[in-house]
Image: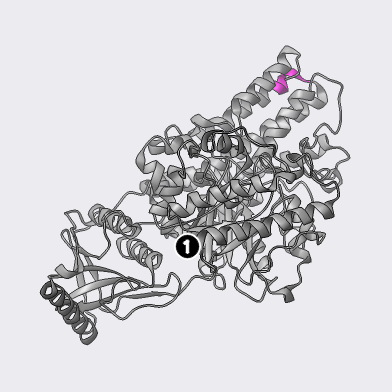
Amino acid sequence: MLRRAWTFFLFLGLLWCNASCMKAAAITLHGNTPIYTSAKPGEPLYKAVLALQRDMEKILGGQHTIRPLTEMDRAGIVVLNSLTDSLLAPLAGWEAHRLYTATVAQHPQVILQGADMRGTIYAIYTFSERVLGVPPLWYFSGWQPAARNDIRVPASFSVNCPSPSVKYRAWFPNDTDLFAPWRKASRDNSELWLETALRLKLNTIEWFDGERDYGKPYSISPTTRLISDYGLLNTTHHHSPLNATFSGWNDYWRKTRDTVPPELSLANEKYLEEFWRYNVECIVRNKIPMLWVIGFRGNGDHPFWFTFNDAPSSMKERGAVISRMMARQREIVLEVTGDPATQFRTIFYDELSDLLAEGYIHPPADTSFIWTYVAARRDHYPNEDIRQLDKSRNFHLGYYFNYQFTSTGSHLAAGEGPWKMEKNYRYVAGKTNRPLAFSVVNAGNLREFVMELSANAAMMWDFSSYRSDAFLEDFCRQYFGKRHAPKAARLYKAYYHAYWNQRRPELEGFDRQFVFQDLRYRRAIFELAKAFNNDFDPNPLTDIPAEQVKGRTYRIIPEDNNAATQVDAVITGTTKSAAAFRAVANAADVLYRRMDADKRMFFSDNLRQPAQYMYYLNESLLLLCKAYKSHDAALVEQSVAALQHAEKALHVTAHGRFLDWYDGDRVFGFKGLYKALGSIRAGKTP
């Protein structure tokens, strides 16, 4: 045993000597180039090694064996994690990575080295992108590999990626009516979105562990496990601090504790603490890396005073309750983990944002605590709480930005754009002297927002040098080809500027502060259908019943549209927007026909068809408004036809692995809109 150990360390020593004494050398990759790694099956790094093997076989053909570092007997690709592999001089820095060539064991090798596990994963995917030509969005873009006999990597090859600007960089899939059923269709659908996140150099997924069964003690959901298996951190949402939401309250007491659920009451704080502790232990016992969220909200997506009958009535007292609960939650996590270095954050969402702005919430005194501010609801710009923040307080700041938004935001087509995202994050970064600590973007069903998600990932990795215009040109060059990239980039910008801005901006520099997104169209069509057979009301669009800020649901200011009423403002705004989207769609048609065949599908899916969809959605609402104003039945039929064209424009993108993508449509709900519009014909109220 001792002799074998001595032989192994001697071998590593010889490898070290070879690597440190020999210069870089060129290497030619071909159909049987091996991959050397110490990673073991089941480990996150090994998943990335398998992806590299798959990428190489797609490009170079052949079979690329995965071998241990001790069997390095010919030229190949060497994967090194500096925390576990001492073969070469280690890298330092959170998630830093480097790609270069070196002679090791008397053979030229491509070295993919990370300072830690995720840094090594990023090194692998950087190599796949830059050398093999596999784009990060390959699974979403319909990318097809261009087969090659060999690839020469020169001795001068060197890529050095220092630590990211923002430490924690997250996606939050939300309102996943399309994404959730699509994931169930295949293992690749279920998993490879996580590979995509890693290829874009994200490191965290915001996910609520709602799939688990309280009848299975200390269980976690398959997705929570999967996120960890890929090497990503878990974090939870503002409605699920400590991995717990009150929607699971009854299940916990009945299934786990086999008892009658106690009342959800502030007076029953000991039961709250037991519930939280159990949910923390579920994560800790399953060894899930967690960025812990603390906070106190009610059942569903509502303030706690909607759920707790004994909640105080004054906002100041409510803020005190939240502050006390957050402090106790932090104590529970520290007790269960036993780790004083545990990282915490909170999320100032909706009522929490308002309470913070009033000075009624006081998070725990923790020098590493991340204060996660949230973009304003419905229209996504820096909210009042972050605008009031004194930079001299020098907090560790996080930011939650919505590409998608429940009930009134973008859902089936992107609407916010990378420029608005960039302006938001630069504003927030200006509120502290530290680098931003955390970012999360509401990613909806993911597919509709992959360009915007790529932009956010690029900015969070290299905050200072990122510029949206330059990013978009690079993106278009990668996915649509060098020749057509400038035109495609201009069309993207025209697409976002085609949206109706229903209100003039209030913040300097935010020219698209207010945007009429597709779910607002959906809501407006439904409300007009509901009002159609009643007396004419020039202002028929109303707030969502639970809206906490009057007028926020639509934010239509007639005067800003040279109109006196909502109806006339909508007619003016949609007329202009429809014309702009039609121009984008027509130009996209021309460019589509000129593109190489292998570039067309993603261009159509991500820009051409969304422009068509938004054109017809504008037409549908415009025609319905005119019909409502004139009571012209023919215009109603034209509105229905336009809505059908909008749906058909989307279904053009339903192909290949996305063939059944729209089967789960619930949030936009085309069927419900057709039914509502049908009620006009029947003279009924939907």
Q: Which residues are magenta?
A: 632-636
Magenta stretch holds residue 76: no
Q: Quadrant of residue 357?
A: bottom right
Q: Nearer the viewer, residue 479 or 351?
A: 351
Q: Amino acid at mark 1?
A: Asp
Vertical side of 180 occupied by 514: above or below: below
Position of residue 80 measured from the top left corner of the image (x, y, whole percent) = 29, 70
How many numbered marks appear? Answer: 1
Color style of the picture: one colour
Tell me if residue 635 is in the magenta stretch. Answer: yes
Q: Seen from this angle, which residue lies furthest bottom?
A: 21
Residue 517 as seen in the image, left or right of residue 145: right
Q: Main secondary structure of the magenta part?
A: helix
Residue at 61%, 41% in the rendered image? 582
Quadrant showing the C terminus: top right
Q: Does residue 512 appear anywhere in the picture?
A: no
The residue depicted at 42 percent of the width and 60 percent of the height is: 482
Instruction: Give percent across and percent down for residue 130.
Output: 35, 65
